[in-house]
Image (spheres, grey):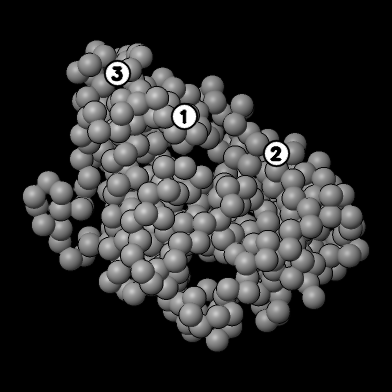
């Protein structure tokens, strides 16, 4: 058995969780910084770090209290090591190092990207990972920082099948929201605004899908691009609302719904194509943008058999510490610990394998 305390500070949410045996979340606490960053229209790394310093201890105490345990009961300390914002990551990493040293516990640094994938198997779902028929797994990790397809086989070997060549989908949603004066964070407000609009009213481009009549080059078959969609929105909004992109009423609702439709369409087309080509048995949809209801529904509709869609619960789609503590269980089992002089990293490193496959 393992009882692991997970800590997450990769961006603008301070989180801690206690996870038993890699699956059972006994306690979880999150402090959001949305209100602090909303006035800036996006996350300010230095401000995020200061807010993490304020929230870390209350969040940590809250997770332990909810789980009904103390640090004496914990077997290891897990923490997001990267990718993410370095000032924010360092707060969590140094906190974790201090807790590890002070309590004589091993430290486990976690790749945030892989943790998002594992989040779909929390709360009793990890048994699926022990079944050969679950593989290969194709994971679409879609968030403010990532839009990528990771292919995982039955041996645990992994490779990046596709990624964004410019903006991530979440970034495109955030920037659209800022452009149209809708507020921050962009994902939730875009979805809410789109509910009153007609997604077929306006047409926005679907880059790298061949929909414009231009064949997609082989190296971009599973890649994504959202900068062109964002630029098209800018020209559209300026045409209808002037240089300040001031849209109102149904014109605004239809624009947002059509823009969201373009992003969802690209995500679903690319994922369905990759799932078919790689004969994926399981498709995982995870990351912050996976909270979007339209994306969740459309992805379920577009996949062909034998691919089965596995969705992370919404509370595990956004940044959280449960996925960190859950994934750490597999490193703890293998006694693969992180050195105390380890540093954080901002960019996604190459991924050749994942730890949660036992075959």
- Which residue position holds label 2? 31
Left or right side of 342 for 56: right
Please state, as top left, top right, bottom left or bottom right, where the N terminus lies in the image. Answer: bottom right
- Which residue position holds label 3? 251
Q: Which mark is residue 192?
A: 1
Q: The residue tagged with tag 1: helix, strand or loop?
A: helix
Left or right side of 341 for 84: left
Circles 1, 3 touching at the beta carbon (< 8 Å): no
Q: Nearer the viewer, residue 254 or 80?
A: 254
Question: Which picture quadrant has residue 335?
Answer: bottom right
**Residue under the point 84% across and 65% down:** 74
Answer with mark 3 or mark 2, whichever residue precedes in sequence: 2
Q: The residue tagged with tag 2: helix, strand or loop?
A: strand
Answer with mark 1 or mark 3, whichever residue precedes in sequence: 1
Circle 1 residues within 10 Å: few <14, some 14–19, many ≥20 = some
Answer with mark 1 or mark 2, whichever residue precedes in sequence: 2
Camera sees residue 313:
yes
Question: Which picture quadrant has residue 300?
Answer: bottom left
**Residue under the point 89% across and 58% down:** 69
């Amino acid at each position: 058995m393992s009882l692991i305390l997970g800590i997450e500070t990769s961006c603008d949410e301070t989180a801690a969780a206690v996870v038993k045996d890699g699956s059972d979340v006994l306690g979880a606490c999150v402090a959001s910084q949305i209100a602090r960053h909303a006035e800036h229209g996006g996350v300010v790394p230095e401000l995020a770090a200061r807010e993490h310093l304020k929230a870390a201890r209350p969040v940590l105490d809250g997770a332990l209290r909810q789980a009904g345990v103390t640090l004496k009961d914990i077997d290891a300390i897990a923490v997001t090591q990267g990718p993410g914002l370095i000032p924010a990551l360092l707060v969590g990493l140094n906190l974790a190092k201090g807790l590890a040293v002070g309590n004589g516990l091993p430290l486990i640094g976690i790749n945030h990207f892989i943790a998002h994938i594992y989040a779909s198997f929390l709360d009793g779902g990890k048994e699926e990972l022990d079944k050969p028929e679950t593989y290969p797994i194709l994971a679409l990790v879609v968030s403010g920082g990532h839009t990528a397809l990771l292919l995982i086989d039955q041996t645990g070997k992994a490779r990046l099948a596709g990624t964004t060549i410019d903006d991530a989908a979440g970034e495109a949603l955030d920037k659209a929201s800022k452009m149209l004066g809708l507020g921050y964070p962009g994902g939730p407000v875009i979805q809410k605004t789109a509910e009153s609009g007609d997604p077929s009213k306006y047409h926005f481009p679907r880059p790298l899908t061949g929909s414009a009549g231009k064949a997609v080059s082989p190296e971009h078959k599973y890649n994504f691009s959202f900068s062109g969609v964002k630029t098209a929105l800018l020209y559209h909004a300026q045409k209808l609302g002037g240089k300040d992109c001031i849209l109102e009423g149904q014109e605004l609702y239809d624009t947002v719904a059509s823009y969201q439709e373009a992003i969802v369409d690209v995500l679903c087309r690319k994922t369905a194509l990759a799932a078919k080509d790689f004969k994926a048995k399981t498709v995982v949809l995870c990351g912050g943008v996976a909270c979007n209801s339209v994306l969740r529904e459309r992805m379920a509709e577009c996949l062909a058999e034998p691919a089965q869609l596995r969705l992370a619960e919404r509370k595990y789609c956004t940044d959280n510490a449960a996925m960190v503590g859950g994934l750490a269980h597999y490193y703890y089992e293998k006694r693969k610990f992180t050195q105390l002089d380890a540093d954080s990293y901002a960019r996604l490193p190459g991924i050749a394998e994942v730890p949660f496959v036992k075959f």
